[in-house]
């Protein structure tokens, strides 16, 4: 067989695989894997953007040392160099290779040295020694421990593997303050588990010698986070895990447990006194400072490293321990103390990375502006309670803290409830716990559902009942409750995968909080193409800050102790994470009932923000400008667009090109609406954007074909084509794809075979199908 007849699979099996086997790969613990790097961005209709897969990933001692991109023997091995570099960068591999089985190319991603290479291929140990020039016993010990994958039931994602190996490498080198920054929903708890698993099995501890198993503390600031972590560590032996909670401490006569390897608790429990009287020393002081070898601080940006906080004092008490901070928030002025304490992250995986890779769900922001976003009391409305001076003005931050206008809240509830699918799970963020109760009641008053449990409030005041509502909401098999209202409590720690809507009815204090709230919706779920943020409070402006991804300002000087939030039911704290926020003004809240005419005249204007591939917000006009530029790079003139669009196979390839540039079917449908052409063919929409041609409707195009474009077809063939035209008019140009032809034939004739007798064979059908489309787009 000539090399030009070889497929890539032939080249791999007959040329590349033997070379790797001869070098010892796939033997003695080394592994050769084909790895799916990412599934591709989630798009409309359950489709995905371009996925990425590496032909070969060479793994030794748990490290992905090299990537090899294969090409068939009949083309140049250099064709794989670009892919190999890209995949090696993503996977964190030191070496990248490209080969067609005849020639080999090597890139050292660390030094930048590259060029053709001669065989033999490096052995696993040789590649290990080239990657790690310094010998490190702990690196070797960690590498000897396999990841815990529950018998192969699940695999680490590439970024999780990079985060784990980066943290372990830091520990192996003796670092004691380590930070990992990964977007919400990317599996930080799973990462912490794998790190703990390696430390436990390798017997890493502060002595530096593998003489005993480590004592590891998982520290969270909310019970739900500690519970999720505790449950995620179930692969450890039962006697190795314990909870440090009030019940356990009471049962031990005020003494916290010490006979375990993994300990789970929350800050609030650790800082109360062992006797639960409020007068003794904090629980954590009952452990020697060097008791724990390794401490994981979950959501460490929420105060754990603030200079003057109780959290900081706790962490400094356990100064000898290696401490790993987990956060979802990039470095900003609001959390600069966190980065100053832990140092720069050893690995970062951003929200936009997760969305583009397809591991997180994309989102849209609906900006809801109304005629009552601000309010001036003029005396025409009824003052039900409190005092207001005539002419006094109120802005967004005043509502439901200084003034309550139930009509205003009702109008907002009606607005989003009238636009969402009321069967979809939704979170509503409110200004205070009282506001969350009001909004809950209003939602239940306007809902379509007859179930009295459709909407519930979950705040600190709701206690165990609220926790049960949250568990039911998180259960994807349950549809009730469908909507939860909250103030602060659910901004973090809600692992609910099927949230489709997030409604903002209170100001967002920072960009960090905004990203955390967005994280409530980014988890993926089957059939979930995107989620929507309904923004009544201009929170989307947080994304317009040009410093979002830049360096933070110097942190403001401390203003006294900053205490941690209090978990419901936990003693010993001084503030409530779900409370009303800043201290209320001493005067009574004003309650106003709008006059009937004013209540009925509240109007809303909704606009949609679009997101560029760089993860930045852009306006509709900027979105169209970007599309114009991208189209101009693909299409030279109107004749080329018409020629491409008239051929169904070329059209499909063209749409794939647009999709790769970020214009999936969902965004292209948005463009139809932006140019006010919802009933037009996408060809007309693009032609309008590029060449300012007036869009025709699909009905007009179909009528043109019916009136003279089917002259070459008659009888059954004509009737068949007319049926396709009707489907095109109704549902759009997707009905004209080549892959739809078999569906039409089966639907009309029962099977493709039966259609042959009626229409004269598949070749004749294909010709007529293409001729009709040429006529459809002829002008």
Image (tube, rainbow, N blue to C red):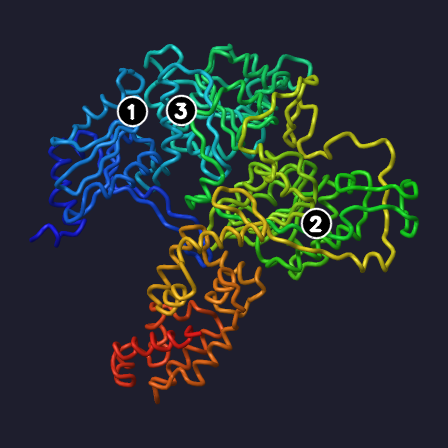
Query: Residue 526, can we see it?
Result: no
Q: Nearer the viewer, residue 420 or 277?
A: 420
Mark 2 → mark 1, Cα distance in angstroms: 59 Å
Q: Nearer the viewer, mark 3 or mark 2?
A: 3
Give the farthest residue toward the left: 1
Crowd rating for badge 2 (residues with CA inside 10 Å; few <14, some 14–19, many 20+): many
Left or right, residue 724 beside residue 554: left
Q: Residue tagged by mark 3?
A: 167
Closest to the camera, between mark 2 and mark 1, is: 1
Residue 467: image quadrant is top right
Q: Which of marks 1 and 2 precedes in the sequence?
A: 1
- Of the image marks 3 and 2, the number of the one nearer the N terminus: 3
Vertical position of residue 708 compared to residue 670: above or below? below
Name above or below for residue 752 compared with residue 658. Answer: below
Q: How far across and down, in percent of the image, does residue 213 sit?
A: 37, 18
Q: Quadrant of residue 753?
A: bottom left
């Amino acid at each position: 067989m000539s090399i030009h007849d070889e497929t890539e699979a032939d080249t791999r099996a007959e040329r590349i695989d033997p070379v790797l086997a001869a070098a010892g790969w796939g033997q003695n613990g080394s592994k050769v894997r084909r790895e799916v790097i990412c599934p591709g961005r989630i798009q409309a209709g359950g489709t995905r953007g371009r996925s990425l897969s590496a032909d070969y990933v060479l793994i030794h001692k748990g490290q992905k040392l090299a990537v090899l991109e294969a090409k068939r023997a009949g083309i140049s091995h250099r064709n794989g160099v670009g892919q190999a570099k890209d995949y090696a960068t993503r996977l964190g591999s030191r070496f990248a290779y490209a080969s067609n089985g005849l020639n080999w190319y090597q890139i050292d991603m660390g030094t930048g040295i590259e060029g053709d290479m001669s065989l033999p291929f490096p052995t696993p140990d040789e590649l290990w020694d080239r990657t790690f020039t310094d010998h490190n016993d702990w690196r070797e010990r960690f590498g000897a421990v396999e990841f815990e994958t529950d018998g192969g039931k699940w695999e680490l994602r590439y970024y999780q593997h990079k985060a784990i190996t980066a943290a372990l490498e830091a520990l192996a080198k003796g670092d004691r303050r380590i930070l990992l920054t990964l977007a919400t929903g990317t599996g930080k708890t799973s990462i912490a588990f794998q790190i703990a698993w390696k430390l436990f099995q390798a017997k890493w501890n502060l002595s530096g010698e593998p003489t005993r198993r480590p004592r590891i503390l998982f520290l969270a600031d909310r019970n739900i986070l500690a519970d999720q972590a505790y449950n995620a560590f179930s692969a450890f032996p039962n006697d190795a895990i314990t909870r440090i909670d009030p019940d356990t401490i009471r049962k031990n006569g005020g003494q916290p447990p010490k006979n375990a390897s993994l300990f789970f608790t929350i800050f609030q429990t650790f800082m109360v006194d062992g006797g639960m009287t409020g007068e003794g020393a904090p629980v954590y002081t009952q452990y020697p400072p060097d008791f724990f070898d390794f401490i994981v601080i979950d959501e460490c940006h929420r105060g754990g490293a603030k200079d003057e906080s109780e959290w900081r004092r706790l962490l400094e008490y356990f100064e000898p321990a290696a401490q790993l901070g987990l956060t979802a928030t990039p470095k900003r002025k609001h959390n600069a103390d966190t980065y100053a304490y832990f140092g720069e992250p050893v690995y970062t995986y951003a929200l936009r990375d997760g969305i583009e890779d397809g591991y997180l769900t994309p989102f849209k922001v609906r900006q809801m502006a109304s005629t009552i976003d601000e309010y001036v009391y003029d005396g025409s409305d009824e003052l039900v309670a409190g005092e207001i001076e005539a002419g006094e003005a109120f802005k967004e931050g005043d509502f439901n803290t200084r003034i309550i206008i139930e009509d205003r809240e009702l109008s907002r509830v009606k607005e989003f409830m009238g636009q969402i699918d009321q069967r979809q799970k939704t979170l509503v963020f409110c200004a205070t716990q009282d506001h969350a109760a009001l909004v809950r009641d209003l939602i239940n008053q306007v809902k379509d559902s007859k179930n009295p449990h459709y909407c519930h409030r979950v705040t600190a005041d709701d206690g165990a009942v609220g926790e049960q509502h949250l568990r039911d909401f998180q259960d994807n098999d349950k549809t009730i409750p469908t909507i939860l209202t909250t103030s602060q409590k659910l901004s973090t720690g809600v692992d609910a995968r099927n949230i489709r809507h997030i409604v903002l009815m209170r100001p967002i204090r920072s960009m960090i909080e905004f990203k955390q709230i967005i994280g409530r919706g980014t988890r993926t779920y089957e059939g979930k193409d995107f989620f929507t943020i309904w923004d009544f409070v201009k929170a989307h402006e947080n994304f317009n800050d040009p410093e979002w991804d830049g360096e933070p300002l110097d942190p403001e000087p401390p203003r006294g102790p900053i205490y941690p939030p209090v978990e419901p039911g936990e003693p010993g704290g001084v503030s409530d994470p779900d409370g009303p926020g800043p201290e209320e003004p001493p005067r009574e809240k004003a309650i106003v009932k709008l006059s009937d005419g004013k209540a009925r005249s509240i109007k809303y204007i909704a606009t949609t923000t679009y997101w560029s591939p760089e993860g930045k917000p852009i306006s509709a006009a900027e979105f169209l400008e970007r599309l114009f530029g991208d189209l101009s790079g693909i299409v030279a003139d109107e004749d080329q667009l018409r020629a491409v669009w008239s051929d169904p196979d070329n059209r499909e390839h063209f749409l794939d090109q647009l999709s790769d540039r970020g214009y999936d079917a969902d965004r292209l449908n948005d463009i139809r609406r932006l140019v006010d052409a919802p009933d037009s063919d996408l060809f007309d929409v693009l032609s309008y954007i590029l060449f300012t041609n007036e869009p025709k409707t699909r009905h007009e195009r179909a009528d043109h074909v019916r009136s003279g474009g089917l002259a070459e077809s008659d009888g059954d063939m004509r009737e068949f084509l007319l049926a396709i035209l009707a489907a095109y008019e109704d549902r759009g140009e997707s009905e004209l794809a080549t892959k739809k032809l078999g569906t039409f034939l089966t639907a009309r004739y029962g099977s493709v075979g039966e259609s042959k007798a009626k229409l004269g064979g598949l070749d004749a059908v294909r010709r007529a199908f293409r001729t009709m489309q040429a006529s459809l787009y002829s002008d």
